[in-house]
Image (cartoon, rainbow, N blue to C red):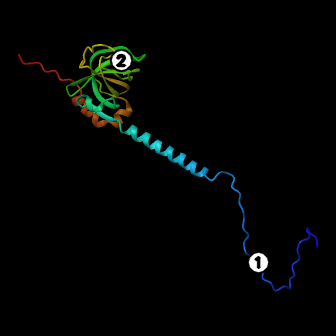
Amino acid sequence: MTDTDAPTVDPNADAPLDLTPRRVTTSRRGPKWLPGLVLVVVAAGVIGLIFSVLSGASLFFYNVDEAVAKRADLGEDRFRMQGTPVGDRFVDTELDGQTAVAFSVAFDGVEADVVHVGDPAELFQPGVPVVLEGVWRQGPAPVGRFVDGANDGWWFESNRMLVKHDADYTEDNAERLREAERGGSVEIITPAP
């Protein structure tokens, strides 16, 4: 019998047939730590996405009177401020090399000066409530003195503006619109003669 010949099995043999499974050896093609690394990267991405969504959702929304009262607490935090543009003079200016417009807004008799960086919303005009997103700044504004403004040494630097008539704003802020219409204009009281 040679090495290439198949073994012969005696059909008359009384020995039981061995059906024990053979050990299969597998060879790993990649490092053992790779699936763990993929899991960590995916988990970090999910956590980052959740953090991003939640931090954007925590942007506070104040009417002008509330925002003015909370200036010290707000510091340099971004928030949204609602008010009605007062006066009929909007001053075109520049802030950090970008075009801007300066104006004042009011709510419930309290005024705040605003410098909005970029183009104002299409429907922006006096008497129509706006929501501005930005931060408080203390010190001289880029326009010097606001014609119809508070001129109290503080101004609101905005880079996002929603006007009452925007469909997104109207849908999301119906109650705030009613408040703005009731309290957004500055009441002028003339004494009786």
Residue nearer the viewer, 59 or 16: 16
Query: Which is closer to the viewer, label 2 or label 1?
Result: 1
- Find the distance from the CA under tag 2 to the CA under tag 1: 91 Å
Q: Dividing the image into 4 quarters, which one contains the N terminus? A: bottom right
Residue furthest to the right = 1
- Residue under numbered circle 2: 101
Q: Can residue 150 be seen at all in this image of the molecule?
A: no
Q: Is residue 75 left or right of residue 16?
A: left
Which quarter of the picture shows residue 120?
top left
Q: Dividing the image into 4 quarters, which one contains the C terminus? A: top left
Which quarter of the picture shows residue 113?
top left
Residue furthest to the left = 193
Instruction: Point out residue 167 in the picture as x, y percentages from the top left corner.
Output: 38, 32
Residue flagged by tag 1: what amino acid is it? Asp
- Residue under numbered circle 1: 18
Labels 2 and 1 touching (C-beta < 8 A): no
Instruction: Point out residue 125 in the picture as x, y percentages from the top left corner.
Output: 32, 20
Q: Can residue 192 be seen at all in this image of the molecule?
A: yes
Instruction: Point out residue 153 in the picture as x, y percentages from the top left corner.
Output: 26, 19
Give the secondary structure at mark 1.
loop
Comes first in the chain, label 2 or label 1: 1
Task: Please name the residue shown 39% across and 39% down the image.
Answer: 55
Numbered label attached to residue 51: none
Task: Please name the residue shown 74% across and 70% down the image.
Answer: 22
Q: Is residue 150 left or right of residue 170?
A: left
User: Considering only vertical position in the picture, is 62 above or below 46?
Assistant: above
User: Considering only vertical position in the picture, is 84 above or below 94?
Assistant: below
Task: Please name the residue shown 11% across and 18% down the image.
Answer: 190
User: Considering only vertical position in the picture, is 193 above or below 69?
Assistant: above
